[in-house]
Image (spheres, rainbow, N blue to C red):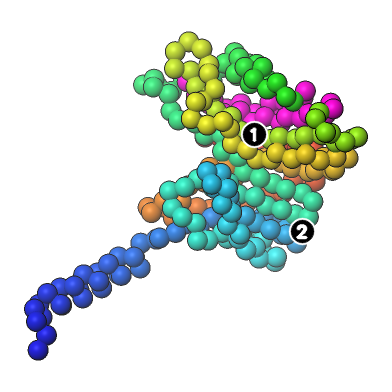
Amino acid sequence: MTPYPSLRWTFALLGTTLALGRAGGADTGTLTGTVDRPAGVTAVTAVNREDDRKFPGKVDPGTGRFTVAGLPLDAAYDLIIDAGGVRLEGVNLKVPRSDFEEEQPLTKEDAAAVSKIARDLNKFENEVEVLAVAGNAQHAALVLNKKRTTPFYESRPGEMIWRLELWHFERPEDDWIKSQDELGVVFYRQRLQKSEFDRISLTLDPALGGLRPTAKRPGLDVGKVTLPPGKPGIFIRAGNGK
């Protein structure tokens, strides 16, 4: 005779309840959407910039419907869509709300001030382009396209260094300062020939960045995604990151 039969059944019932709870609620998230020219798509990927973990997805070559499943919840993901030599990549320009009761926008003067500080902080690159600035009166996010095209230590003829990074700034009082919590989110940091760089076709899209599945909303649909035309260069689509 099994001792404490009621206790045994209590544990069994508890295990069944927990299993049903897991079955009824999502353990992972999913990102979906529809790309306009699916025939040329070679890969769809979601990346967590916190740990650089990548999650491959699937795309239907007929309908253009794509799905990236199995994403850990409560993390932010950027979608990356590759179509041959063309890449469309999400960038997260979202920032925390300001402390004001009514949200105060980032002014043109603020954007100019933050851009100047960011350029001045970059001493190694001889070309620093601010592709985008977004935020509010106390927080800002900048996308920096940085290049070192002049000779550097052990550089070879025609060689350069390219860095594409996302920086965050804050203004606790009167002056803007770079966020102390991070050095910057690195998208690309490459040493390559200038001729190779000139062939890169990369378009950043805020609408595909900072996608965060949660237990209450595990499935996110980004809608219709239009691939860029494939012109060489580093571009960003218009978007305020909200």
Read off the residue under disc 1: 165
SS class, disc 1: strand
Circle 2 packing at 10 Å, graded few (<14), some (14-19), many (20+), is some
Left or right of residue 92: residue 150: right
Residue at the limit of the structure toward the right, as seen here? 157
Q: Position of residue 216 (x, y in %)?
A: 37, 52
> Front-most of 119 and 74?
119
Q: Which residues are magenta?
A: 126-151
Q: Earlier in the sequence, mark 1 or mark 2?
A: 2
The residue drawn where x is 54% and y is 22% is 178
Cα separation between marks 1 and 2: 27 Å
Placement of 30 over or under 15, stated as above or below = above
Q: Residue at x 58, y 48 (%)?
A: 52
Q: Residue at x 58, y 32 (%)?
A: 184
Tell whether position 129 is magenta: yes
Q: Secondary structure at mark 2?
A: helix
**Residue ID for mark 2:** 40
**Residue closest to the eye, 27 or 101:** 27
Q: Is residue 62 above or below residue 162?
A: below
The image shows residue 168 at horizontal and vertical percentages of 55, 28
